[in-house]
Amino acid sequence: MKFDTVIIGGGLSGLVSGISLQKAGRSTAIVSAGQNAMHFFSGSFESLTEAPERLMEIFSESGVNVHYSKGVRLMPLGTFKESSLSLEDISIFPDPAFARKVMVVNLAGYHDFFSSFIAEGLEKTGIGCRVCTIRLPELEHLRKSPSEMRSVQIARVMDRIWEKVMQEIRLMLKDEDAIVLPQVFGLQDITVPARIREVIPAKVVFTGTLPPSVPGLRTQMQLKRYYETLGGTFLMGDEVVDAHCHDGSVHSVETRNLGRHYLEADNFILATGGFFSKGLAATPQEVYETVFNLDVEYSEDRNAWYDPDFSKDQPYLDFGVKTDEALHPMRDSVTFKNLYAIGSILGSTRKEFGTASGGAILSAFHAVDKILSGK
């Protein structure tokens, strides 16, 4: 099968590049193994200091509702982080003291939402807090197994019963001017978070839980749907197992599901992510890229890979494949002229694009522009 561009990886950077190329009239295929960084998405596009017009156009056309407001957002452990461009249901505040009194609401049996940590963090800002738990018969079948009481399973139920849940929460409210809820609303019905805010007589703040991320999965589904509407081919649950290269050029790739039916293309984009998505892997001696065995920038000192303080940024997250100005990666110092590396597989090797989701988006646009210009 022949395409203009084959994209390896179906996360944010892969979908943004695929959508952009399809809109430009190019034929593309995305090979997606499944789990990616969108499953860990906080709901805020970190490191983006402005809202790129071309990104806002993609979001608008795909139904992803966002807002731009410089400030801070509430994190799952009760701390605050600077944010700006975020999904519509993620609250951005001018400063951490966003309310006088807050009611933090959790669901009985749900251990992936840290209500006590959130309350403790808010109290440090001078906000009075009260933690409440709501028991829902509709979730009893999930509570029988801790592995089932997860964000996605809960969200599927909440899309059906959110009105009942909000009625109970209204009765629990006293004199609080804000409530904090886990992000388990609006997985399939994207209107639910906004409708919740309409019926609750207090500021509603949705706060992250342990992965998988409900807003991240919802965003991925919206972008994937739009990509396919544009004519893109999305190969879900597949992965590249071999690449056919010659003289610094990739000619085709072989996937697990298609076997000997190779995917051929003029250009290839590597968007497989970092360690979490298995785009990068490590042995005790080295860090390596898993598809093309590309050159990777990392410290040769194994002890420098991590910080003993788990709460700090870990150095290994900065490791990434080596690229030239156009984001062409290399193997044994030989540059692949029709292969582009984007997203978190870059680590912090290209600081000009930023980090996390912001870096994924800007590096995707950079690679797309190079492809469209023939560079």
Image (cartoon, rainbow, N blue to C red):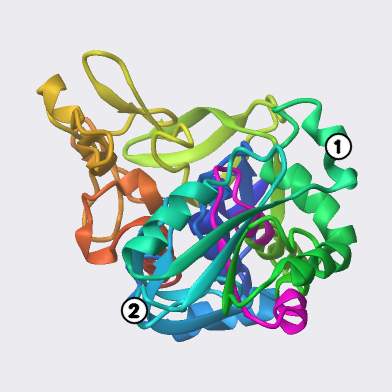
Q: Nearer the viewer, residue 312 or 331?
A: 312
Point out the image quarter for the C terminus.
bottom left
Q: Give the residue type at disc 2.
A: Asp
**Picture layout, residue 34 above or below residue 370:** above
Q: Give the residue type at disc 1.
A: Glu
Q: Is residue 53 visible?
A: yes
**Residues rendered magenta in the picture:** 194-218
Q: Is residue 375 visible?
A: no
Q: Quadrant of residue 182?
A: bottom right
- Disc 1: which residue: 140
The spot of residue 337 in percent (x, y) is 33, 50
CB within 8 Å, label 1 to label 2: no
Q: Residue extending furthest left?
A: 301
Q: Quadrant of residue 300?
A: top left
The spot of residue 77 in percent (x, y) is 42, 50
The spot of residue 335 in percent (x, y) is 25, 43
- Disc 2: which residue: 95
Q: How many marks?
A: 2
